[in-house]
Image (cartoon, grey):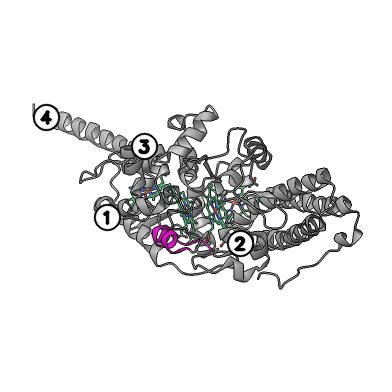
């Protein structure tokens, strides 16, 4: 009898141990997102106050807070707000007649987004002026937005002025911009992204977790424009997200951000198209790498492993950012330097070509007797050249996210700019307009 009891006890212990091992193996193999789903303290849906989420997730919250005070620069980027207009005065010419020629600083951490948008000299806070800044400019700057879009609707939100919206906006970017409370899964929070994907026949709720680690950044790091009088936030993706597809979209809609002084070219301003640029068949995207892999690498806190929410340039922590996949970190960082130097130099010579085109078209317009068809063709090429250059310039990685694509776009841009210059010269039959190098300054770093 006693022997039986021992045997049964031993059997029970073995079964329990096996079950426990099974549970542990199962838990360990769960993706982080599914593991960390249960907040201890309930978080309201779309809660704008990140500190309320932080009670549950102190590691993510503490690392997120660091984005407020980061200020270290790299060669071409980093976390200070250096002025692009001072570094590269060609840009004052390229953006003439548009607010970007007044104030254009490098980006910094997520916790500063609200302060920085309120401070920029690009704002026009005179609500009587037809060109006043719309509320739409707050779209990517605050964790209050998901709740506001839900309550007001996107259309009503976008019809308000920046001033009118200001009292509703109290927090910089936060947890609610990327996560669903309760489950903590990554979600599309910006209606403009949801709608742009839908128009392409894509439904983000079917995306894999790895895809979402990139798509969640597309809530903001994309090219966009304000459509119509209602300033409706819209991504120009109906034909696709590659440069030619975006250009053909704008061609069809006839949209312009501003008119270039002296040439009368209908201009486009590119925003920060990191998502479109990275996903245009870059090596890393093709290999299944996500934005979060490089910008939010896993970090250890004792036994706990969490995604660093201190999002910044990966060149400041290459061991964590690149070392998870590349054994020779020094080598890949050197590659980044080489790629960026090549792209930055090519970008400057492209700018020279566009400035020459601008000067030639201006002279042709001023002459008063230009062939209108040739002049119009020159303007079209000027518009395209500038937009292509800007897609690379406003993209924040100085080409690294997709090096071959960056150089291809810059080559196409310079080609268009030189053609524009030639057409302008032809339009008044004056070869002196073919002069080049009217504007050369000290190159950036
Ligand atoms: C393979 C790694 C990698 C991936 C994947 C990646 N990046 Fe980057 N990213 C970099 C590097 C390297 C830089 C250049 C940093 C520098 O110049 O200091 C950079 C720069 C940036 C910058 C500018 C940083 C600064 O300091 O101003 C932003 C913004 C950015 N990336 C966003 C994204 C987004 C959004 C995605 C996904 C669509 C993405 N990145 C995918 C490596 C990566
Ligand atoms: C809610 C909008 C929003 C989302 C979502 C978002 N970003 Fe940003 N991001 C911004 C804005 C705005 C800035 C610039 C803030 C400033 O300059 O004050 C920025 C800045 C950055 C920078 C520059 C930081 C520095 O120190 O210079 C990096 C890198 C970056 N984001 C990467 C990402 C990645 C990767 C994702 C996705 C995991 C992401 N962002 C998601 C809006 C967003
Ligand atoms: C810019 C987008 C963004 C913001 C803002 C953001 N997160 Fe995350 N978060 C991510 C991404 C990307 C992951 C990785 C998810 C994955 O791998 O499935 C993540 C993962 C997590 C996880 C899962 C565990 C882990 O570390 O991988 C938790 C918990 C979390 N975040 C909490 C927070 C909290 C709390 C805040 C606000 C203080 C916050 N997040 C703000 C993008 C964001
Ligand atoms: C999640 C994994 C992963 C991370 C993180 C990662 N890489 Fe990569 N990287 C890859 C893969 C996969 C390839 C393609 C390798 C191949 O096909 O041989 C690659 C290729 C490269 C190449 C060669 C590119 C080319 O076109 O030939 C460079 C340079 C590079 N990575 C730099 C970096 C840098 C710098 C970082 C950190 C900022 C980084 N990588 C982070 C996975 C990663």
- Residue at which label 2 appears: 333
Q: Name the image quarter holding residue 394.
A: bottom right
User: What is the CA distance from the residue labelled 2 to the residue labelled 1?
Assistant: 35 Å
Q: Mark 4 to mark 3: distance in Å?
A: 68 Å
Kindly report which numbered mark, 2 or 3, lies closer to the viewer in this rendering: 3
Is the distance from the Cβ of mark 4 to the nearest ligand 3 atom less than 8 Å?
no
Q: Magenta segment: does it hold 99?
A: no
Q: Is mark 1 within 8 Å of ligand 3?
A: yes
SS for dot 4: helix
Residue wearing tag 1: 51
Q: Earlier in the sequence, mark 2 or mark 3?
A: 3
Give the residue displayed 19% in from the left and 31% down from the top: 12
Rendered location of residue 44, percent (x, y): 24, 43
Q: Earlier in the sequence, mark 4 or mark 1?
A: 4
Residue designated by label 4 = 5
Q: Judge left or right: residue 268 versus residue 138.
A: right
Which callout, 4 or 3, points at the residue further toward the start of the chain? 4
Could you tell me if the residues under marks 4 and 2 are in contact, i.e. CB atoms within 8 Å? no
**Residue 110 on the magenta segment:** yes
Q: Which residues are magenta?
A: 106-120
Tell me if residue 28 can be seen: no
Please name whichever residue, 216 or 199, is drawn nearer the observer in this view of the structure: 199
Q: Would you call the spot at circle 4 few (<14 residues within 10 Å), some (14-19), or many (20 or more)?
A: few
């Amino acid at each position: 009898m006693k022997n039986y009891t021992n045997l049964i006890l031993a059997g029970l212990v073995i079964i329990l141990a096996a079950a426990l091992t099974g549970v542990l193996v199962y838990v360990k193999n769960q993706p982080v997102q599914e593991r960390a789903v249960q907040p201890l303290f309930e978080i309201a849906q779309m809660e704008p106050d990140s500190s309320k989420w932080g009670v549950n997730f102190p590691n993510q919250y503490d690392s997120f807070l660091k984005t407020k005070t980061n200020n270290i620069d790299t060669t071409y980027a980093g976390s200070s707000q250096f002025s692009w207009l001072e570094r590269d005065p060609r840009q004052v010419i390229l953006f003439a007649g548009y607010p970007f020629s007044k104030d254009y600083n490098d980006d910094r951490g997520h916790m500063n987004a609200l302060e920085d948008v309120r401070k920029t000299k690009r704002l026009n806070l005179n609500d009587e002026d037809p060109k006043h800044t719309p509320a739409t400019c707050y779209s990517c700057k605050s964790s209050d937005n998901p709740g506001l879009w839900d309550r007001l609707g996107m259309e009503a939100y976008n019809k308000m002025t920046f001033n009118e919206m200001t009292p509703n906006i109290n927090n910089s970017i936060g947890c609610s911009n990327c996560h669903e409370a309760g489950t903590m899964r990554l979600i599309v929070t910006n209606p403009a992204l949801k709608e742009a994907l839908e128009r392409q026949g894509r439904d983000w709720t079917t995306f894999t977790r790895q895809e979402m680690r990139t798509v969640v950044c597309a809530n903001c790091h994309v090219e966009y424009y304000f459509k119509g009088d209602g300033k409706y936030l819209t991504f120009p993706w109906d034909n696709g997200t590659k440069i030619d597809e975006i250009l053909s979209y704008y061609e069809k809609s006839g949209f312009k951000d501003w008119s270039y002084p002296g040439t009368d070219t209908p201009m486009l301003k590119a925003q920060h198209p990191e998502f479109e640029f990275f996903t245009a068949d870059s090596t890393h995207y093709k290999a299944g790498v996500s934005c979060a892999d490089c910008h939010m690498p896993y970090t250890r806190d004792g036994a706990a492993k969490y995604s660093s929410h201190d999002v910044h340039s990966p060149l400041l922590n290459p061991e964590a950012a690149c070392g998870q996949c590349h054994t020779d970190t020094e080598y890949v960082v050197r590659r980044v330097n080489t790629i960026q130097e090549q792209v930055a130099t090519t970008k400057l010579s492209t700018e020279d070509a566009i400035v020459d085109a601008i000067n030639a078209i201006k002279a042709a317009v001023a002459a008063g007797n230009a062939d209108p068809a040739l002049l119009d063709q020159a303007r079209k090429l000027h518009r395209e050249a500038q937009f292509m250059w800007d897609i690379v310039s406003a993209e924040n990685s100085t080409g690294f996210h997709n090096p071959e694509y960056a150089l291809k776009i810059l080559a196409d841009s310079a080609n268009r700019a030189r053609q524009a210059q030639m057409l302008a010269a032809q339009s008044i039959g004056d070869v002196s307009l073919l002069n080049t190098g009217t504007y050369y300054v000290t190159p950036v770093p």
